[in-house]
């Protein structure tokens, strides 16, 4: 049994590799000469690729569950004392396993695309399958060579060290990494259709329509992954924050920004036949940036709590990134004249113009974050000197760009196509502007003097009011059933508005939790108390708990308001076997109005050092992020509408 599962896992990866190579060959051959390829072969090959991914992941999980330390990956990340839940999540807790998960997700997307390609005469679809086969060849190739987790050890240990403590200390490990992978890998689909369209010298909107659902699904999963990652950081790391502009955090944010620009400009191309070149550039950049993000995570070229150890995977990923970037944009340059849109925005004062400004802001934002992230790496590679780009740089650049995006988000969906007159805009935005002005004035009267906070409140309130007004004037009857029918009949539009509403809530939560936060560090002897944020905190005792995989030491901190006990906070230190340093775990008391956050600075039997934080409206950050992701999923819910390329071209011509 000790060698059966490793052999099965490696065989699955080899099956996936062979199927990917064959799929690439068949897909491109069918694109050039459909009559020489049978459709059934394409579909069977795609399902063999998926079967290889399933077999590899099943063998990996099975080896973890059976304590098969003869497999190198199990010996690296597992221990017999690890609980069942975290044993399963260890399947993606390190480099090799994470790439196995990547190949499984990629194979799943490929199988879905193969199911939608109903004939070899669908040259756009078969070409996309060929591109996905090339991508699959690379990643299955990594799993079978430099990142092979199925290697059999000659002298296996009796037990292992277990996963990184941060990866077995919170339930979020089961959701955050898979959601990020579903997002990252999902952008392979629009990339594949874009490359296929370029190979065919075919513009138009067909490739956008064919990949729209996959792009939105990937964007929604990546949004959820980013939010859950911030929540995980907030709940686990104990530093009191949720976003530190960590290089690997940035590596996930950058493609999200570019993908957001792509989704917006795709709407303009479908509706008005404009920004086609933008869409090709943005989708190529999005996929290339997912590869760059994977390189940053798995090469250790940056110092991060997220990065894996040094390995030969880094150079391979960097080479693939250069290949994707160089090959994709070279092909685009060769087809550039054919891909240029025939029409351009008539005026900046139009929905097309606002969307163009929105795209410029998003791409500049992405470029700024990318520059700040890779600049230290490039300087060290060229000169050997170590430099750092800190949070002040990112904050100074992000704030004005974010304000511009909030403004564009507020007025864009309500601006007419072609030309927006002042009278029309005043009619549509009069109530939202008055509402926003009232909210901003109320904040000033309440004593808020920070102009940034007041401006964000103005923009957020205006955006929400504009969405509500649009719903009120659009719904035929003011009844829940009528509203529900409207939301279902126009899923794409109202999914976008739901996402915009979520962004507004996120912006309000960020500025409130930042501008009005309270922080303090106190040292308490046993039985002593301190005052913080309207609460009295008393250190009562410590307790030690022996668990299967750790020793947990809690500090009991009683929070009172007056004589009433409102909360018993239990920040703790977790000491894992085989790990020299204990890991802190804060105690968070969430609420609709504020969070109270208690983290350990130091812990002794009779004395404790506490880092205390109070964050207004922090819970709204997670709720807003969930709304953003839900908006994306709502936009793609329901049955897809099938349109031929000719019908789509006719729609654009009439627009």
Image (spheres, helix red, strand yellow):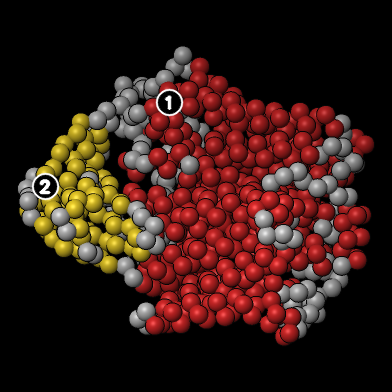
Q: Nearer the viewer, mark 2 or mark 1?
A: 2
Residue sitting nearer the eye, 227 or 500? 500
Q: Nearer the viewer, residue 425 or 641?
A: 425
The C terminus: image quadrant: bottom right
Secondary structure of the residue carrying tag 2 is: strand
Q: Pick the residue in front: 365 or 616.
A: 616
Q: Is residue 413 visible?
A: yes
Q: How many marks?
A: 2
Q: Viewed as shown, does residue 479 lie left or right of 655?
A: left
The image position of residue 37, as x and y in percent, is 87, 34
Choose the circle earlier in sequence order: 2 or 1. Answer: 1
Residue indicated by mark 2: 540
Cα distance between the residues tagged 2 and 1:
41 Å
Q: Residue 380, relative to residue 462: is it above or below? A: above
SS state under label 1? helix
Residue 187 in sight: no
Task: Name the residue located 44 percent from the left edge and 17 percent from the top edge.
Answer: 2
- Read off the residue under disc 1: 64
In the displayed structure, does residue 49 sit left or right of residue 221?
A: right
């Amino acid at each position: 049994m000790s060698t059966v599962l490793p052999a099965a896992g490696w065989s699955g990866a080899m099956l996936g590799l062979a199927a990917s190579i064959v799929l690439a060959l068949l897909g491109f051959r069918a694109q050039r000469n459909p009559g020489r390829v049978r459709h059934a072969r394409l579909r069977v090959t795609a399902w063999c690729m998926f079967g290889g991914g399933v077999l590899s992941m099943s063998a990996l999980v099975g080896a973890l569950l059976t304590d098969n330390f003869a497999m190198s990956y199990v010996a690296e990340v597992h221990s017999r004392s690890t609980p069942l839940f975290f044993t399963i999540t260890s399947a993606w807790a390190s480099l090799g396993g994470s790439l196995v998960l990547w190949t499984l997700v990629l194979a799943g997307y490929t199988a879905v695309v193969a199911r939608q390609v109903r004939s070899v005469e669908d040259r756009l679809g078969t070409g996309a399958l060929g591109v996905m086969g090339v991508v699959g060849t690379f990643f299955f190739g990594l799993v079978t060579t430099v990142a092979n987790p199925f290697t059999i050890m000659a002298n296996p240990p009796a037990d292992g060290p277990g996963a990184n403590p941060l990866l077995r200390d919170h339930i979020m490990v089961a959701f955050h990494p898979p959601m990020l992978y579903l997002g990252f890998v999902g952008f392979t689909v629009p990339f594949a259709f874009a490359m296929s369209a370029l190979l065919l010298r075919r513009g138009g909107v067909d490739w956008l329509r064919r990949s729209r659902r996959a792009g939105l699904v990937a964007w929604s999963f990546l949004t959820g992954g980013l939010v859950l990652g911030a929540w995980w950081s907030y709940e686990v790391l104990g530093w009191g924050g949720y976003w530190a502009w960590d290089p690997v955090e940035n590596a996930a944010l950058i493609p999200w920004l570019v993908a957001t620009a792509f989704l917006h400009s795709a709407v303009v191309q479908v509706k008005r036949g404009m920004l086609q070149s933008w869409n090709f550039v943005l989708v190529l950049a999005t996929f290339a940036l997912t590869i760059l993000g994977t390189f940053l995570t798995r090469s250790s070229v940056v110092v991060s709590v997220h990065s894996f150890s040094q390995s030969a995977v880094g150079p391979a990923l960097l080479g693939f990134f250069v290949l994707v970037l160089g090959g994709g944009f070279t092909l685009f340059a060769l087809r550039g004249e054919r891909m240029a849109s025939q029409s351009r925005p008539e005026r900046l004062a139009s929905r097309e113009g606002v969307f163009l400004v929105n795209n410029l802001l998003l791409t500049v934002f992405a470029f700024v974050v990318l520059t700040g992230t890779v600049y230290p790496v490039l300087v060290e590679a060229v000169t050997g000197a170590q430099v750092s780009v800190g949070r002040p740089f990112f904050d100074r650049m992000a704030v004005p760009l974010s304000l511009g995006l909030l403004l564009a988000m507020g007025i864009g969906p309500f601006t007419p196509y072609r030309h927006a007159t002042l009278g029309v805009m005043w009619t549509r935005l009069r109530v939202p502007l008055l509402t926003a002005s009232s909210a901003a004035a109320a904040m000033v009267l309440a004593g808020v003097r920070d102009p940034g906070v007041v401006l964000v409140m103005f923009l957020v309130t205006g955006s929400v009011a504009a969405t509500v007004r649009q719903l009120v004037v659009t719904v035929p009857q003011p009844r829940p059933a009528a509203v529900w029918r409207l939301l279902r009949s126009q899923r794409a539009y109202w999914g976008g508005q739901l996402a915009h509403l979520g962004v507004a809530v996120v912006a309000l939560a960020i500025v409130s939790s930042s501008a009005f936060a309270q922080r303090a560090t106190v040292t308490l002897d046993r039985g002593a108390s301190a005052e913080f944020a309207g609460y009295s905190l008393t250190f009562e005792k410590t307790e030690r708990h022996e668990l299967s995989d750790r020793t947990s030491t809690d500090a009991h901190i009683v929070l009172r308001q007056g004589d009433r006990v409102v909360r018993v906070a239990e920040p703790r230190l977790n000491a894992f076997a085989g790990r020299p340093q204990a890991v802190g775990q804060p105690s968070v008391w969430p609420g609709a109005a504020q969070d109270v956050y208690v983290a350990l600075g130091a812990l002794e039997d009779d004395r404790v050092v506490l880092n205390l934080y109070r964050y207004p409206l922090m819970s709204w950050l997670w709720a807003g992020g969930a709304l953003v992701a839900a908006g994306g999923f709502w936009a793609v819910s329901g049955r897809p509408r099938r349109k031929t390329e000719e019908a789509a071209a006719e729609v654009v011509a009439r627009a």
